Each structure stands twice: as C-alpha cells, then as structure tokens.
Image (cartoon, helix red, strand yellow):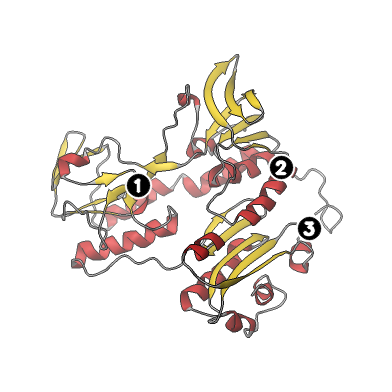
C-alpha cells in the first residue's frame, strides 16, 4: 500500500508477537472443551484408544464398553519415503516455532506449503517449496493456480516442480536436503524442513481388526449413514472416514452432526454433500466451489466458461493489489452455475455467494438480476456470469 495512503515504513510481520497473539486463541481451547464436556455430562479419558472387540475399546489400561462407538480421530501427516524423515516438522509444530528460522523448505505443493510459505516469506524468511508433480494445488483451477504460482515466485519463494526429496540430514547446525530435479541433483541447506505433502487417516495403533472394522487408505469404510460397513456398532466421520467429502473442517463438522443424529435416533439421517467451497489462504486468496472444467467435461455437460484476469478492476486496485481473476462455468440451456473459481482479494468471502447460488440452483440470470450493495466485492459477481 506504499504511496496509496498508508505509510509502509517499518511495516513487517513480527513472528514472535504473531505467535503470542495466536496462542490467545488456541491455548485455552483444550481446557475449555474439557470443561464444556464435563458440564454436559460427558466423561473423558486421556490416552491412545484401541479396539479389543466389536463393542469394546481400551484407553491405556482402562477398558470401556458401549452400544455404539464413534471413530473421529482425524488425519496425520503422511509418512514420506525419505531418508531422515524424522527431521521434518508438521504444520502444528511450524506454528509453534520460536523464533522463525531464516531458511525454510516445504515438502509438497498443497494448501499447507503455500499458505505457510506466504506467511514466512512476508516475515522475512528465505522460503523454498519442492513439489514432486508438474502442478501444485492440483485440486484448483490450473489457470488460476498458474497465476498464483507466478505471484508466489515474485514474493521471493523458490518453487521447484517435478522435484523429489531423497533425504534430509543434519549438517553443522542446519539440515541438508538432497533432491532430484529436472535440472539434476540438488542439495539445499536450511534451518527447518516442513512436511506439507498430504495427510492420511489417523488410525495407527487402533487395532480396527479387533473390532471387525473394515478400513482402507482413505479411512474407515462406511455406508450412507456413516456406519461401519462391517460392524453396525461403529460409526466414523471426518478425515478418518472413507467418504466423498473433502478433508476440510466444515465437512468434518457436517459429518459429525450426521453421526450424532444417527447415534441418538437410529439411522435416520443419510450423509449428503452440498456444494462445499475450498480455499487457499495465500495473499491473494484462491477459492473454488463446484465443478472444474475437466470434471464438467467428464460428466458430459455442455457449458460455457467465463474467464478473465481482473487486476485492473477497481475492487482489486483499491486494495493495492494487482492480481485477481475468475473462472465461472455456466451450463448451456439452463444457465445453472456449475462451478466458480476465484483468485484475488476477498475471494474467500465472495466464493460463499457462488456456493449458495449452486446449492439453490440459481442461474447466471438470477445473479445478473440481483442488485448488490456497491461498492462491494459481491457486486463484481454479476460481471462474472
């Protein structure tokens, strides 16, 4: 915002102060949650749980028996076939770093790596991302991802694609990362290596076989009621369940409500998945809901694509930003919104309007005919369809 009304001298991220501020949100959560559980008459047991039978588990030496068991253990970082993987830290540990290391390398080109890379680079760190595929953020529209990649590199982040990490080893107070890249072997020395290469269901050590609970790489196998396909006494939801939902916090909460209803009232509620937006909180943010072009074509749908870079729009320029774009898929004949993909300031909020439009079956004409408050980001939507 320099020269646009804000004096930018000295403006920077103070990492230590940022972490202290973050803890005012996070430190009290476990204690307040346990107090809320106790006040609600819910017993808590601390320790690693494992099945000992179809309706019995043990937490440490404490045996427990129940008519119903709900597995909601979430996900953990995937184990990577890298020599020296024990030197990696996960996203939780990264947000406890004090102070922020000067040189940081992220393995993987997903949400975690891009979001944290944008923060770390703006906090003054030298940041590198190594991604083993040809395109990062593969869940998002490729044209918008290409624009975000360009901005990320302009920020000073070094991004290597088709790069495979082979080993991580201590090297005189630092860590040496050996990687294979299209340009040949690379050796990089950094102070911190962060695991950003995906997560898997957290089911290790639960002995699901003892409970006759079938599971696979995507988690516990469940039916439409989120009930185990092999043990009707067991339910599962969230990242540890094999469901079509995205591995996102609101999806886990949605599935948790379904399981709660079925635990209390019997199998009365089937799992359904309304349009669910997905976001990457970089600067600017990237957001998506509904179908992408490849998905729509695979389903045989006929549609038109509205795609435009909008860095010269007033809503972008007035925040001192120069990067924004959108891509919206509109079905031919019906005018239904099939998918929306946004990059730019306030994309994380504007995508919610498209989410509601898709869920309600609104058409492009419905959006064009809506009078939005002006000047707002939502008022841009009528020009996108």
For the C terminus, the image quarter is bottom right
Residue at the limit of the structure toward the bottom, as seen here: 369
Rendered image: mark on residue 218: 1
Q: Alpha carbon of mark 2 to alpha carbon of mark 1: how far?
A: 33 Å
Residue at the limit of the structure toward the right, as seen here: 3
Q: Position of residue 173 (x, y in %)?
A: 60, 17
Q: Alpha carbon of mark 3 to alpha carbon of mark 2: how far?
A: 19 Å
Instruction: Indicate which label's residue lies in the foreground, 3 or 2.
Output: 2
Mark 3 Cα-neighbour bin, 10 Å: few <14, some 14–19, many ≥20: some
* Viewer-nearest residue: 357 or 172: 357
Mark 1 Cα-neighbour bin, 10 Å: few <14, some 14–19, many ≥20: some
Instruction: Indicate which label's residue lies in the foreground, 3 or 1.
Output: 1
- Residue 233 sits in quarter: bottom left
Mark closest to the chain's N terminus, 3 or 1: 1
Q: Are marks 3 and 1 in contact (CB under 8 Å)?
A: no
Rendered image: mark on residue 320: 3
Q: Alpha carbon of mark 3 to alpha carbon of mark 1: how far?
A: 42 Å
Q: Which residue is mark 2?
A: 153
Q: Position of residue 11 (x, y in %)?
A: 76, 45
* Viewer-nearest residue: 313 or 332: 332
* Viewer-nearest residue: 21 or 352: 352
Residue 51 visible here: no
Question: Helix or strand or loop: what does disc 3 sit on?
Answer: loop
In the image, taking residue 21 as reference, residue 250 lies left or right, namely left
In the image, taking residue 317 as reference, residue 226 lies left or right, namely left
Q: Are marks 3 and 2 in contact (CB under 8 Å)?
A: no
- Residue 366 sits in quarter: bottom right
Residue at the limit of the structure toward the front, as seen here: 300
């Amino acid at each position: 915002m320099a020269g646009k009304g804000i004096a930018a001298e000295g403006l920077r991220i103070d990492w230590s102060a940022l972490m202290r501020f973050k803890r005012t949100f996070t430190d009290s959560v476990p204690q307040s949650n346990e107090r809320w559980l106790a006040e609600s008459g819910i017993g808590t047991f601390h320790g690693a749980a494992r099945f000992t039978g179809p309706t019995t588990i043990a937490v440490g030496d404490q045996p427990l028996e129940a008519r119903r068991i709900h597995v909601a253990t979430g996900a953990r970082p995937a184990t990577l076939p890298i020599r020296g993987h024990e030197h990696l830290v996960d996203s939780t540990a990264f947000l406890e770093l004090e102070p922020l290391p000067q040189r940081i390398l992220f393995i993987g080109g997903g949400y975690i790596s891009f979001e944290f890379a944008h923060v770390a680079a703006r906090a003054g760190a030298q940041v590198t991302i190594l991604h083993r595929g040809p395109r990062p953020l593969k869940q998002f529209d490729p044209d918008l991802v290409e624009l975000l990649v360009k901005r990320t590199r302009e920020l000073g982040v070094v991004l290597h694609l088709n790069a495979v990490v082979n080993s991580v080893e201590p090297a005189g107070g630092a860590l040496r990362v050996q990687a294979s890249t299209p340009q040949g072997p690379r050796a990089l020395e950094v102070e911190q290596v962060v695991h950003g290469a995906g997560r898997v269901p957290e089911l290790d050590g639960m002995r699901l076989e003892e409970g006759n609970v079938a599971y696979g790489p995507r988690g516990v196998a469940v039916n439409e009621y989120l009930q185990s396909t092999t043990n009707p006494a067991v339910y599962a939801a969230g990242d540890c369940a094999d469901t079509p939902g995205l591995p996102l916090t609101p999806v886990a909460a949605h599935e948790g409500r379904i399981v709660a209803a079925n635990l209390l009232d019997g199998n009365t509620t089937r799992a359904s998945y309304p349009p669910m937006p997905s976001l990457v909180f970089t600067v600017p943010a990237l957001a998506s809901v509904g179908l992408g072009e490849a998905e729509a074509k695979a389903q045989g749908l006929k549609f038109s694509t509205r795609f435009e870079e909008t860095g010269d729009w007033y809503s972008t320029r007035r925040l001192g930003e120069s990067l924004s774009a959108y891509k919206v898929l509109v079905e031919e004949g019906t005018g239904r919104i099939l998918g929306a993909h946004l990059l730019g300031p306030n994309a994380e909020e504007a995508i919610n309007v498209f989410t509601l439009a898709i869920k309600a079956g609104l058409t492009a004409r419905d959006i064009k005919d809506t009078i939005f408050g002006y000047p707002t980001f939502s008022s841009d939507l009528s020009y996108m369809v």
